[in-house]
Image (cartoon, rainbow, N blue to C red):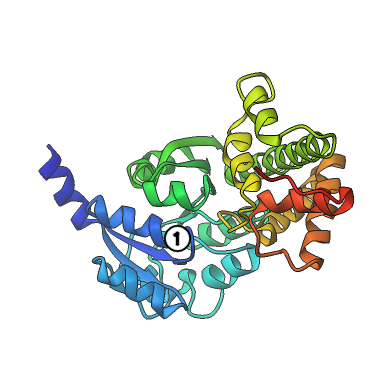
C-alpha cells in the first residue's frame, strides 16, 4: 500500500511558489512524502536548496502553474499573492482549467475571495489555507492548517496538506481559512501581551519570573503561548520564530476585516500600537515574544532568569 501511494505521489506534480522561512521546510516535507515538486522563488539560494533536495526549478509562476495540477503559494501578504497569481507571468496565465491553487499565505480574507473569483472565470478552484505553528512546526510537518473553500476541493487536497500539518481543518467557504488565522493571531498577540504585563509586574515587585511561570502554567492561565514564549523571554532570546513585522501585517488585516464586517477590535488595536512602537524602536525583526520589551522599557526592569 505504501509503495502504491508513493507511485501515485510521483505522478502528481505540485507547484510550490514562495520558499521563505515557512515555505522552504514545507516544500521539503512534500518531497519527503514522495511528491514531484516544481518550485519558484526570487531567492535563488532558497531555490537551490530545495532543488538539491529533489525539486525541479520553474522559470516563473506562469511556468510552474503550466506544469502542475496543484499550485501552492506561500507568500508574505495580499499584494504579493495578487501579483504572483493575477499579475504578469503569474499563475493565472499559465494554469490549466481544473487546476487548484492552494494559497497558504496569511492574507486579507476579502483578497482571497477576489482571487478565487478571478480563478473561477478560468475554471480553476482555490483553497485559502493559512498555517499556524511557526518555523519549528513547518520543519517537523506539524503545522495547524486552517482551510477555506469547497468541501470537494478540500477532500482532493487533504493528503497534500496533511504532509505539512498535524491538524488540517475545513473552516468554511473561501476566505474562512484566513478569517480563522486572523482569530488565531489576535489570541496569540493578546496572550503574549498579557504574559508580558504579568511577568514585568512580578519582576518589578521582586518575585522571580521563573517561579511565577512555573506556578501558573499548570492552572487556567497556562497556554501553549505561555510555554513557548516565557522561557524565551527569560533568556532574553528574541530570535524570530515569527517576526513582529509579520504580526503587524496580520493584525492590520484583522482590523481591516473587523471594519468591513462591523466588529470593534479594541484589544487588538491596543496591541497593534505596542507592536508599532517596537517597530519604530528598531525591533520589527524580533520575535513577537519581544512584545515584553515594550513593558520592560516603560517599567525600567528586565524579565530574566
Vertical side of 160 occupied by 78: above or below: below
Q: Position of residue 82 (x, y in %)?
A: 60, 67
Q: Position of residue 50 (x, y in %)?
A: 32, 68
Residue 82 visible here: yes
208 left or right, relative to 129: right
Q: Residue at x 62, y 27 (%)?
A: 214
112 left or right, relative to 64: right
Q: Residue at x 62, y 30 (%)?
A: 223
Q: Residue at x 44, y 50 (%)?
A: 138
104 left or right, relative to 155: right
Residue 117 or residue 241, whichever sits in front: 241
Q: Position of residue 24 (x, y in %)?
A: 41, 62
Q: Quadrant of the N terminus?
A: top left
Q: Position of residue 99 (x, y in %)?
A: 38, 58
Report the residue marked by disc 1: 23
59 left or right, relative to 170: left
Crowdedness near tag 1: few (<14), some (14–19) or many (≥20) residues, C-alpha within 10 Å: many
Residue 10 or residue 282, whichever sits in front: 282
Residue 70 visible here: no
Q: Residue furthest front?
A: 206
Q: Label 1's element?
A: helix
> Quadrant of residue 276 in the image?
bottom right
Vertical side of 212 occupied by 79: above or below: below
Count of residue discs = 1
Vertical side of 235 occupied by 88: above or below: below
Amino acid at each position: 500500500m505504501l509503495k502504491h501511494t508513493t507511485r501515485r505521489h510521483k505522478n502528481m506534480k505540485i507547484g510550490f511558489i514562495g520558499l521563505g522561512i515557512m515555505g522552504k521546510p514545507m516544500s521539503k516535507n512534500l518531497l519527503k512524502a514522495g511528491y514531484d515538486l516544481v518550485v519558484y522563488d526570487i531567492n535563488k539560494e532558497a531555490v537551490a536548496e530545495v532543488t538539491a533536495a529533489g525539486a525541479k526549478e520553474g522559470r516563473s509562476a506562469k511556468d510552474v502553474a503550466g506544469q502542475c495540477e496543484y499550485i501552492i503559494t506561500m507568500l508574505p501578504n495580499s499584494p504579493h499573492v495578487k501579483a504572483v497569481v493575477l499579475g504578469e507571468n503569474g499563475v493565472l496565465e499559465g494554469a490549466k482549467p481544473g487546476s487548484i491553487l492552494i494559497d497558504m499565505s496569511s492574507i486579507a480574507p476579502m483578497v482571497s475571495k477576489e482571487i478565487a473569483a478571478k480563478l473561477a472565470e478560468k475554471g480553476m478552484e482555490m483553497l485559502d489555507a493559512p498555517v499556524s505553528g511557526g518555523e519549528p512546526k513547518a520543519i517537523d510537518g506539524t503545522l495547524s492548517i486552517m482551510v477555506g473553500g469547497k468541501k470537494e476541493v478540500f477532500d482532493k487536497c487533504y493528503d497534500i496538506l496533511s504532509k505539512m500539518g498535524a491538524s488540517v481543518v475545513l473552516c468554511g467557504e473561501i476566505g474562512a481559512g484566513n478569517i480563522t488565522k486572523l482569530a488565531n493571531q489576535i489570541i496569540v498577540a493578546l496572550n503574549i501581551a498579557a504574559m508580558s504585563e504579568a511577568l514585568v509586574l512580578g519582576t518589578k515587585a521582586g518575585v522571580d519570573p521563573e517561579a511565577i511561570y512555573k506556578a501558573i502554567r499548570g492552572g487556567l492561565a497556562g497556554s501553549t503561548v505561555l510555554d513557548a514564549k516565557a522561557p524565551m523571554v527569560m533568556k532574553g532570546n528574541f530570535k524570530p520564530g515569527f517576526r513582529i513585522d509579520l504580526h503587524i501585517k496580520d493584525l492590520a488585516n484583522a482590523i481591516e476585516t473587523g471594519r468591513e464586517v462591523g466588529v470593534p477590535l479594541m484589544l487588538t488595536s491596543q496591541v497593534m500600537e505596542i507592536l508599532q512602537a517596537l517597530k519604530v524602536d528598531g525591533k520589527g525583526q524580533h520575535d513577537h515574544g519581544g512584545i515584553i520589551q515594550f513593558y520592560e522599557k516603560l517599567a525600567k526592569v528586565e524579565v530574566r532568569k
